[in-house]
Image (cartoon, helix red, strand yellow):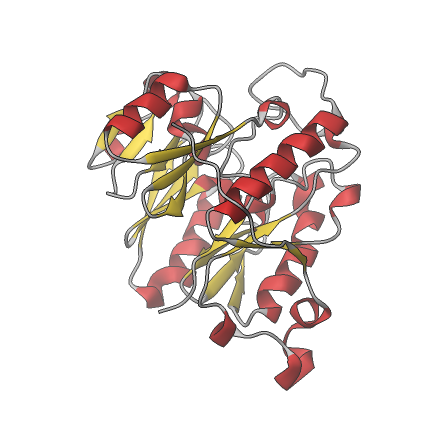
Amino acid sequence: MPSVFSPPPRRIASDGELAGAALGAGRCTLLHVTKKLALIRRPSPHIADGIVTHIERRLIDHGLAREQWDGYVRAVESAGWETIEVPGGEDFPDGAFIEDTMVVYGDLAVIARPGAEARRAEVTEAVKVVEGLGYSLRRIEYPGTLDGGDVLKVGDTVYVGLGGRTNEAGIGQLREALAPTGATVVAVPVSKVLHLKSAVTALPDGSVIGYPPLVDDPSAFPRFVPVPEESGSHVVLLGENRLLMAADCPESVARFAGMGYEPVTVDIGEFQKLEGCVTCLSVRLRGIG
């Protein structure tokens, strides 16, 4: 059964986190990132103008989207994560999909260059927050494009979707940025959905899960586990075997519960109308060391 927990308080990104290195001793640093933090950004009043690529546009209720976002944030907080709200989302229809702004690996934040030009300004405030937290920064530069939603980390292997918002130059730059960490970057084709993590995510045991009709090449993953619903392929690892999932995939929820996991379900229907899923709505910072 889905779990319910009592959330800790949420906070807005502080001046110290936004100012980065310029604040010196007063700023938050990686010494403080020993607990689970999640970057979030509230949905814009203009969310109905968000980009759609592989599905038909449908009407979006901003008020309902805000209620669903609040429920998502409560679920994350209830699982022991402290959320940091990144400012500046009001002007960006797709700004709530903050995962696309960066890829975080250890103490390195690789700042994305979104494939949709209209979304590139979304990264600015998110960069200030991770810089203020003390992360080292690398940036994807022209001609590279890379969306964070195209990047799936499984142990020391980093799968990157190629063919939609992320191009070969962007993957090459990510591979170069992660080389000192020992991570292996593997490009995999994406043509049926917006991002790689629209098609597949991974369980805590490293198995990659996906809805087969939307996965270009299941053989790209050493351990691929099919799921019966599209939304069932999207999980956020909350820790302690808890999986954050959308509420519209009951068969997949039951299957994972039968495997010993503890699904935590949320309604994100308004965001799904923009090809969003549970991974898109946060950047998880799991601490260092």
Q: Is residue 233 left or right of residue 114?
A: left
Tell me if residue 194 comes above or below residue 205 in the rendering. above
- Viewer-side residue, 173 vs 97: 97
Residue 281 in percent (x, y) is at 57, 40
**Which quadrant, please, contains the N terminus?**
top left
- Viewer-side residue, 175 vs 271: 271
Residue 184 in percent (x, y) is at 29, 54
Tell me if residue 230 comes above or below residue 147 in the rendering. above
- Viewer-side residue, 120 vs 22: 22
Q: Is residue 188 left or right of residue 148?
A: left
Which residue appears at 44% of the width and 68% of the height? Answer: 34
**Which quadrant, please, contains the C terminus?**
bottom left
Q: Quadrant of residue 207?
A: top left
Residue 251 in percent (x, y) is at 35, 17
Can residue 5 be seen? yes
Which residue appears at 65% of the width and 73% of the height? Answer: 20
Which residue appears at 55% of the width and 48% of the height? Answer: 7
Residue 38 in percent (x, y) is at 54, 53
Which residue appears at 54% of the width and 39% of the height? Answer: 280
Q: How many labels does the image show?
A: 0
